[in-house]
């Protein structure tokens, strides 16, 4: 049985620890001395304006880019992931707004894609479709997700249902850290609510979560901690319960709150959450 997320964070070393991470593209410094951690079962919201370095950082954690300096420690070991596959094999998954599902095949085929179960029939390996369907149904049911039929092609499912398949697949196959890059940008209010609930269920199983979102209310709804990047550096790292929307906006922009009315109008933000 899994420990509650708060207990996991208090009793174990960080799942992910970034120490003085730097990334340069020629003369351009995209990241400078970025340090923060993610605990087991902890949800960290990574916030910042466009160009702050969020996507660059996620690519380094997930194996898309190598750091120019600093250290990445994952699951207690110093690691440099040289490809997304290497990071995936270590237990790190990235879920983008454009999901990595094959829309022209059904739910079961997507759930086990690349990990298909086979059995021998007259000495010839064939897909064990019954076992795969049973395990997919159980995994999705245990996560509280509703999908009308496992035989329906993914193209006929809603955006929220597609994200549920991807997250449930990650949990089922032993994922340790999931990076969510604007996961709800194309979803409606109800689908977003269910997605946020799913993130909490995932973290309750001891899985670390980093969520990038430009909708700060979502960060306050789901994150244990908020890390703000501004111009390639960490401008803030604070427990969600100990900050508010005004403070986070000030970290993002670097301006006094009195000067932020134009920014808030642009983002459609209230002053309080």
Image (cartoon, rainbow, N blue to C red):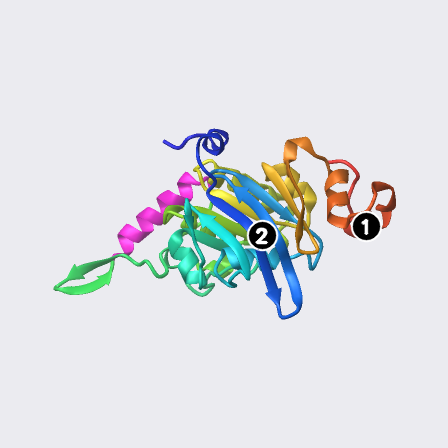
Q: Position of residue 3 (x, y in %)?
A: 42, 30
Q: Is disc 2 surrounded by few (<14), some (14 to 19) or many (20+) residues within 10 Å?
A: many
179 or 67, which lies in front?
A: 67
- For the point 58% across and 36% down, the residue is 224
**Does the stretch in magenta take in 24?**
no
Q: How many marks?
A: 2
With respect to residue 24, does 182 lie above or below? above
Q: Which callout, 1 or 2, points at the residue further toward the start of the chain? A: 2
With respect to residue 139, does 10 lie above or below? above
Q: Quadrant of residue 270?
A: top right
- For the point 61% across and 44% down, the residue is 45
Secondary structure of the residue carrying tag 2 is loop
Q: Residue furthest bottom?
A: 26
- For the point 69% across and 60% down, the residue is 51
Secondary structure of the residue carrying tag 1 is helix
Q: Quadrant of the C terminus?
A: top right
Is residue 147 something that shows in the picture? no
Q: Quadrant of the N terminus?
A: top left
Image side of residue 131 versus residue 72, left or right: left
Q: Is disc 1 surrounded by few (<14), some (14 to 19) or many (20+) residues within 10 Å?
A: few
Please state which of the two labelled residues, at mark 1 or mark 2, is closer to the viewer. 1
Q: Which mark is residue 263?
A: 1
159 or 250, which lies in front?
A: 250
**Residue position marked by numbered label 2 in the rendering:** 183
Separation of residues labelled 1 and 2 (CA atoms)? 23 Å
Q: Which residues are magenta?
A: 128-145
């Amino acid at each position: 049985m899994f420990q509650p997320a708060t207990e996991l964070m208090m009793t174990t070393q960080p799942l992910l620890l970034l120490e003085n991470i730097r990334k340069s593209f020629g003369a351009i410094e995209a990241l400078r001395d970025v340090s923060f951690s993610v605990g087991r079962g902890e949800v960290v919201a990574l916030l910042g304006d466009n160009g702050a370095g969020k996507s660059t950082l996620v690519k380094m954690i997930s194996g898309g880019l190598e750091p120019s300096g600093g250290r990445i420690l994952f699951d207690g070991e110093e690691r440099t992931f040289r490809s997304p596959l290497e990071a995936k094999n270590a237990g790190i998954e990235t879920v983008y707004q454009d999901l990595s599902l094959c829309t022209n095949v059904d739910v079961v085929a997507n759930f086990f894609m690349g990990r298909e179960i086979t059995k021998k029939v007259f000495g010839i390996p064939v897909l064990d479709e019954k076992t795969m369907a049973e395990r997919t149904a159980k995994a999705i049911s245990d996560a509280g997700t509703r999908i009308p039929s496992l035989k329906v092609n993914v193209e006929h499912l809603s955006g929220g249902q597609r994200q549920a398949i991807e997250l449930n697949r990650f949990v089922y196959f032993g994922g340790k850290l999931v990076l969510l890059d604007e996961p709800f940008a194309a979803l409606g209010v109800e689908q977003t609510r269910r997605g946020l609930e799913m993130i909490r269920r995932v973290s309750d199983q001891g899985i670390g979560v980093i969520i990038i979102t430009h909708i700060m209310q979502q960060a306050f709804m789901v994150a244990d901690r908020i890390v703000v990047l501004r111009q390639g550096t960490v401008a803030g790292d604070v427990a969600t319960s100990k900050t508010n929307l005004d403070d986070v906006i000030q970290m993002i922009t670097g301006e006094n709150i009195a000067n932020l009315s134009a920014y808030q109008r642009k983002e459609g933000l209230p002053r309080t959450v």
